[in-house]
Amino acid sequence: MTIFHAAVFGIIQGLTEFLPISSSAHLALLPWFFGWEDPGLAFDVALHWGTLLGVLLYFRNDIKDLIIGWCGSLRGKREPLNVLSWHIVLATIPAALAGYFLEGKAETVFRSPVLMAFALAGAGILLYWADKTTGPKTPLRGMNWKKAAVIGLAQSLAIIPGVSRSGITTTAGLFLSLDRESSVRFSFLLSMPIIFGAGIKKAGFFIDNLANISFWVAFAAAAVSGMAAIHFLLTFVKKRSFTPFVIYRILLALIILAWFTFSHR
């Protein structure tokens, strides 16, 4: 892989991991559209380590508060912030199980362009519906065990490229009456253990590429663009809806279907 290709993959990974438009779909479609060699799921997961670094750096203060809160929960304190770390653990379990049992399909069947297109459009429509639901909205302190479990189940669907981990967890949060910023923030915090776990499983790929300059270019590009995407989205949702992302998802789905149809004639 050239340095240019590695940088492009890293930037795309960083931006699309946190924007609700599906990183896995974009990484799978990038070589398909431009005729590049598909680096495969192992490289996709390795890129996630770059975005993990980005989210760790961006939310370093939140992480400190989560650790303090977790220690407080062990001493019997049950304030919302103290149990938030346990909510993240609970919400991580379904996705971890889905990744463990469906990894083979994630590398083959689920990477079908047609399936990605329908996943992009379908999950996008759900995001639009959730964003337009009315009623009282609660901040992140309104998170409870039931909401965490539902968001965790929703996250497990992200094993299908096109669904978008950040998109589907944000959608679930909105349906559960969390406000936009809280839904997005919980989605970002929830990304840390699942990305870390996926990276650990592919640690061998990391070790084999320690001397690969292209790999480190992709890693750095993913970290920087990931932090930029987090900051952008948290700022964006304070005043605007998710509609632009929904439109993008549907347009991309139509382009994929059109491209697939004409390329197979």
Image (cartoon, rainbow, N blue to C red):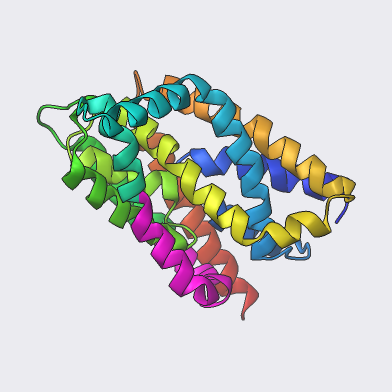
Residue 253 x %, y %: 47, 57
Residue that sits furthest to the bottom in the current view: 265
Decide whether residue 101 is among the magenta residues.
Answer: yes
**Residue range (magenta):** 92-119
Q: Main secondary structure of the magenta part?
A: helix
Please state the horizontal and vertical placement of residue 99, each as a whole percent of the image: 47, 65
Is residue 250 rendered to the left or right of residue 146? right
Magenta span contains residue 198: no
Q: Quadrant of residue 228?
A: top right
Q: Which residue is drawn at 54% across and 43% down?
A: 17
Q: In which quarter of the image is the N terminus?
A: bottom right
Placement of 112 over or under 199, stated as above or below:
below
Q: Residue at x 67, y 30 (%)?
A: 224
Residue 124 shows up from this direction = no
Q: Mark yes or no: residue 108 visible.
A: yes
Residue 38 to residue 215: above or below: below
Counting from the top left corner in percent of width and height, residue 261 is at 55, 73
Residue 35 or 235: which is nearer the viewer?
235
Q: Where is residue 4 in the image (x, y as percent from the top left)?
A: 84, 45
Q: Residue at 46% across / 73% down in the picture?
A: 102
Q: In this view, does 158 lie to the left or right of 69?
A: right
Eyeballing the image, is 123 above or below 117?
Answer: above
How many callouts does the rendering have? 0
For the point 71% across and 48% down, which residue is it? Answer: 9
Horizontally, residue 104 falls left or right of residue 135, namely right
